[in-house]
Image (cartoon, rainbow, N blue to C red):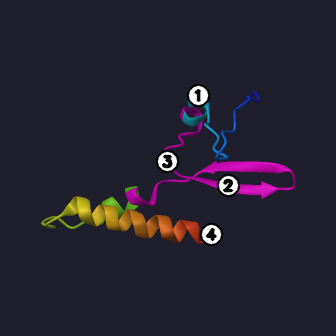
Amino acid sequence: MTAELAKVDKKGRILLPARIRRELNIKNIVEIEVQGKKIIIKPVEDPLNSLEKLVVKGTKDVEKEIRTLRRIAERELSKGGS
């Protein structure tokens, strides 16, 4: 893979080029690690994909439960559970 330049906006956000996102199958969650003066970005499977499989048929409001499960999963990820 060749190196590419990416801009950092005023809020510190970096837009990963589409080619890289496709190549690494990056959807909406990544793990970021600092090693010395390098930043390592690794794709992470969205925990919601795993949780969706556990939703029981007959649930009254599946979308609400999925939103709740997403918030829980994102909270757990933010705690640094690698």
Residue denoted by label 1: 19
12, 74: nearer the viewer: 12
Up the image or down, 58 lies above or below 8; here it is below
The region drawn magenta spans 22-48
User: Which residue carries the number 2 mark?
Assistant: 32
Tell me the element at label 3: loop
Which residue of the protein is positioned furthest toward the front in this rendering? Answer: 10
Q: Residue furthest right?
A: 36
Query: If the image is split into quadrants, where does the C terminus sit?
Result: bottom right
Q: Which residue is mark 4?
A: 80
Q: Position of residue 44 (x, y in %)?
A: 55, 53
Label 1 and label 4: CA atoms lie apart by 28 Å
- Amino acid carrying label 2: it is Ile
In the rendered image, which residue does mark 3 sit on? Answer: 28
| Residue at image coords 30%, 62% | 66
| Circles 3, 1 touching at the beta carbon (< 8 Å) | no
The three-letter code of the residue at mark 3 reads: Asn
Whole-number angstrom distance, CA of label 2 to CA of label 1 = 19 Å
